[in-house]
Amino acid sequence: MSRGEVVMPVVRGVRWTVGAPLLIAAALAWLGAMALMPVSAEAQQLPVAAYSFDAGEGEVLEDLTGNGHDGTVEGADWTSRGRYGGALEFDESGDCVSIPDSPDLQLREEFTLEAWVRPQAESGDHPVIFKEIEKSMSYGLFLVSGAYPQGSVSPQPSKFVDDKAIDPLPQKVWSHVAFTFDGAKLRIFVNGELIHAVASGGPIASEKALRIGCSRYWKETFDGRIDEVRVYNRVLSAGEVAEDRATPLQTPQQLPIAAYSFDAGEGEVLEDLTGSGHDGAVEGGEWVDRGRFGGALEFNGEKGECVTVPDSEELRGREEFTLEAWVRPNSPVGDDPILFRADGGNYGEVLGIGIWSPARPEGIIGEGKSEWESVTGTESIEANVWTHLAFTYDGAKMRLYSNGTLVGTQAQAAGPTGGAGPLVIGCNPNWTSEVFDGRIDEVRVYNRVLDAGEIGVDMRTAVPAKPTVMTGEAEVLGPNEAIFLGTVASNDAETRYRFEYGTTTAYGQMAPETEEEIVYENAEQEAEEAVAYLQPNTTYHYRLVARNTVGTAVGEDKTLTTPPSEVSPEQEKLDREEEEDFTASISTLPPNFLGLNFRGLQERTIPDMEKVAETGASMYRISLEDLTHFTAERTKYDEVFQSAAANHMKVLFVLGSRHLTTNKSGLATWVERIVRRYGKANAGKAGSVWTSENAPYAPTAWEVWNEPNIGLNSLNPPPKREGPDTPPANQRPGNVDPKKFGDYLEVMSKAIKKVEPNATVILGGLLLVGTVNRNGAEEKEGKEDEINPEKFLSRMGHTDDYDAVGFHPYAFRANNGSPPKEGPDEAKEINQVRMKVRNAIVRLRQKLKSHLKDGKNKKLWITEVGWPVGVGDNAHPAVTNDIQAKLVRAVFSTIKKRAEHWKVANIFYFNYRDAPRGTRESLAWDFNTGLLDPQGNPKPAFEAFQLQAK
């Protein structure tokens, strides 16, 4: 895989944990790829240390990887004005962060050091990351001669190899610097681009501390701010460095500090939709409904028309800022202020049209009383046409954008000096005759600089309302587990949410661990997330946090207290280790809880079923794939039911979707014939395979198969299986028609219940739901069934025509993007897969409860879950036999423990035996998930499955 194919939607190096003892490194880019996306054969290692600098206070700089490389902060000041979130500010007076030595940090063969820096020194050498040895150094990343990035190593005592950038970094501007060593060459990167390289040997081993912002031996200290430090014990490629540059460790990109949609339509208040309270007082102007998005305010160029937002320290764009607006001027000749901040004649920042250059857009920064510098666009703004304008300042340059295109740049050493003046929209408070003439819409104000891509996104997107959230009361399930509850309303904008929790109000842990939940529609969603590995007899704080592109809503802080453990601390530790090693088994099971899947009719005789029964399975799931309306293969299916019963097993008969090509009348007749032959209600009667009315193993549940997301649910005549004219699965006609499928489901359900009124009808085959989330593109293309089960189910309707929902929560990858592999991280990676399955079930459970009538009472039948061995394609990587067995233990034991709470009726492993080698089927992942090899010999997973039945 290339680094462009990000395997996780999460930030490399962040600790998203499922509990205090378990630290999961993940990478959250709020949108991105999930468990089944393309992945490289080799998983890339995460940082050995990573620091977001977001704590804001205290004497400890926390290592977010969970490796324990916390630093001691000495002297440096916390600031909220980091590159992402907070930062530490150093002032050359001995400020330092010291991190104790560890073998992880003794980097000799290869490494990568990264940081965001905002320097302000004009001379001198300034360490960013520095590993000491006695009277010298091992490796380090510096700014030398003021602000030239340089990486250095000591291959031998008192000998240094330096790799220095050609140009200095701009002062008081954030820049990303990276220093790599691959065993032969040093490389220095600035803002994601390779600047220089030089040959070198590796650094001397060091058992001294790692420092950030200082060198104790040389008594040098950084002058400026440092943020987002990462340390790797491997070399990163240029693409990976660029990815880290664009991806914050913990805090997402800062949202606007003020945003206005102009959609109120009336009133004297312009609401700040960020929730920051920067509401504006509307004087004059006219509300209109013909804005760029929704409404707008129309100014007629008359004196006194203005929107005034009271002064706030937050609105004073001292260091960097971005101002944006959509405007539709009536006649842009001159003197059209759009956004203006000034204190008397002392200008702050201004965005306008024609203020000094007729009809052209302008950005202005004040430098004192009646003094300013400006940047001007190259083209005039057209009258009576909507134009998007943006004005940015990064600490060194002003930039002006028109319709997303950079149209002007001007060097500017200092930010605006304007004092305590209000921010006004549509007028110049110093010259009241200067009033905008036209409409203004979609104003955003940031206290950071946006790049061209971000400006383009804002240009195309309306300012939404902030989400609404409420933290609910948690359900405490025991000494180590709980479920967080709450509600989130998206307010008609894509909204992402998760729970924060921890033993203090600093929280520090999140659920879900590796990706946020997403609400796409204007609806209220119930939020529910399971957490494990909590400490017994401990009070936890938690809250629900939701965000969209305009703001973040934070729910009320609540607390829960776990009960004391019923066992000793020593036994608790043993139990924890046992669960983490996935050797636990459960002594009691619901009836017919464990099942196995089969492909075809290979295992149908009594000897076959004797071996199946050895697994401990009590149910056998098989699909009816006979296209002869159940005539040619009837005797084979008879053998399946009779042999299963002889071995004390029930059969779950899956009514395959290919039979939906018949007319409804024929379909009903076909279904009735099957249920009369094999069902419990007709046992002992004419036409039944059962000779006795007792028939304890006659089925009472029937699954209606539906897999729209892989194109197997064509309600039109199916295409040829092979040949040049065969359309791809996802393009087969009818495969995303929920309403049409619902109509056929009704026919089948009524036919089943006509014969067997008390039967359980299972809606089957929600295949890619839960463990796969997408970025919304599929939804926009009409493929939302595979990412939004609640949409498919609600559009399908017919909730009275099924009693349970079949679910396939496949999850193949750990959080590093690869399947679990044998080695030191094996247990952790297996546990990450286990938690993906666990949380998928929780999410579907709450979606059923939120979106379906009586959804909370519908049981889940986990009719497929499994892991392939030995083969795999891009979507389904393979694991080893031993790892497969451990995954079976981990996932099945977890589901058994929580079955009652989750309303899980049963779980079926997929599948019983691998396909024979050399066949076409043997190349597919799903024919290599077996508990037996192709010759029928048990694999380790066979015994693991047996343990679950005890």
Image (tube, helix red, strand yellow):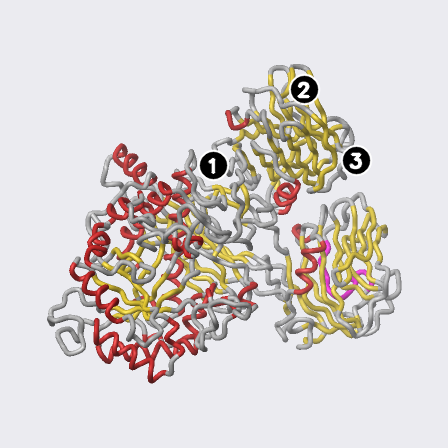
Residue that carries the numbered disc 1 in the rendered image: 66
Give the class, few, some or many, for how many residues have Cα within 10 Å of label 3's Cα (few <14, many ≥20): few
Q: Position of residue 840 (x, y in %)?
A: 40, 56
- Say what amino acid the circle numbered 3 marks: Asp
Q: Residue extending furthest bottom?
A: 665
Residue that carries the numbered disc 2 in the rendered image: 218
Q: Position of residue 37 (x, y in %)?
A: 51, 53
Judge whether residue 906 can be spotted in this image.
Answer: yes
Give the class, few, some or many, for how many residues have Cα within 10 Å of label 2's Cα (few <14, many ≥20): few
Q: Residue at x 29, y 49 (%)?
A: 936
Residue that carries the numbered disc 3 in the rendered image: 167
- Say what amino acid the circle numbered 1 marks: Gly
Q: Secondary structure at mark 3?
A: loop
Q: Main secondary structure of the magenta part?
A: loop
Which one is nearer the viewer's eye here, 356 or 68? 68
In the rendered structure, which disc, 2 or 1, sits on the residue that comes first in sequence?
1
Q: Position of residue 139 (x, y in %)?
A: 63, 25
Asked whether the residues under the numbered discs 1 and 3 touch, taking CB atoms below 8 Å apart as contact, a structural biologist would say no
Q: CA distance from mark 3 to mark 2?
A: 24 Å
* Number of numbered tags placed on the structure image: 3
Marker disc for residue 150: none
Q: Is residue 291 above or below residue 418?
A: below
Q: CA distance from mark 2 to mark 1?
A: 31 Å
- 803 sits left or right of 493 in the view: left
Q: Position of residue 615 (x, y in %)?
A: 24, 50
- 430 sits left or right of 855 in the view: right
- 680 sits left or right of 223 in the view: left
In the rendered structure, which disc, 3 or 2, sits on the residue that comes first in sequence?
3
Magenta residues span 421-431
